[in-house]
Amino acid sequence: RKEVEQDPGPFNVPEGATVAFNCTYSNSASQSFFWYRQDCRKEPKLLMSVYSSGNEDGRFTAQLNRASQYISLLIRDSKLSDSATYLCVVAMDSSYKLIFGSGTRLLVRP
Amino acid sequence: DVKVTQSSRYLVKRTGEKVFLECVQDMDHENMFWYRQDPGLGLRLIYFSYDVKMKEKGDIPEGYSVSREKKERFSLILESASTNQTSMYLCASSFPGLAGVGGEQFFGPGTRLTVL
């Protein structure tokens, strides 16, 4: 079983739609959680951290459910520029390592 | 702006060749990482370094070695390239401390290596 699992998609949505991705992680000792974004043929970049209380950054909302070991990313009012692959990332506070999921691809159409 | 640069965007090598991939960062970061990214498998950590001359194996170190002689430079070496090492190689750097502190790694643009 992979440590971090994501639906690969693609999620194909119209502009203005709301879309949500989930990600599950297997190690209950995971302490820190992040979403990274990777545009086609580009490097990954940090989108946002995920806090236990949930957090929002503009149109993006991230949530953590420790009991069920999943995190989610909600994108409201999708823009064409949101088309990318979204990587779910977990870390143990005792480690230097980030553990990446294989990503969920989002396509936003006009 | 943090900048992480990699020596080549595209590289084609033959089986058995020794391959050097270079990574340089300009933010005085202690931590540096080498990943490979393959479709369906995501990013997998090959090696990382948290200080000059320090290195730690990641999840898939077999067939690779690394060198960190200067703080800003982290090199990945394929001692004898094989076709299953055809992949996208990404270098990253981060501030000192463990992954759970901040969590942001800054990536280079990647090197797409093809081994024939």
Image (cartoon, coloured by chain):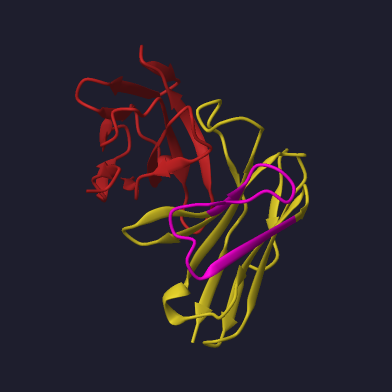
Chain colours: A red, B yellow
Q: Residue A100 in magenta?
A: no
Question: Image point 57% across, 39% down: which residue?
Answer: B105
Question: Image point 39% across, 42% down: which residue?
Answer: A87
- Given residues B98 and A81, the one toward you in this image is B98
Q: Residue furthest left?
A: A68
Where residue B31 sits, quadrant-wise, is top right
Q: Is residue B82 above or below residue A45?
A: below
Q: Residue furthest right?
A: B70
Can residue B97 be seen by looking at this rendering?
Answer: yes
Report x, y in % for residue A37.
Answer: 45, 42
Question: Image point 47% across, 50% down: which residue?
Answer: A39
Residue B88 is left or right of residue A110, and the answer is right
Question: Image point 25% across, 46% down: which residue?
Answer: A11
- Given residues B65 and A72, the one toward you in this image is B65
Q: Is residue B76 above or below residue B101?
A: below
Can residue A83 be seen by looking at this rendering?
Answer: no
Report x, y in % for residue A66.
Answer: 27, 21
> The C terminus of chain A is located in which quarter?
top left
Q: Residue B49 in magenta?
A: yes
Tally of numbered discs: 0
Where residue A80 sits, quadrant-wise, is top left
Report x, y in % for residue B1.
Answer: 73, 38
User: Which residues, given as a range, are shown in magenta?
Assistant: B47-68
Residue B76 is left or right of residue A8, and the answer is right
Report x, y in % for residue B3.
Answer: 71, 46
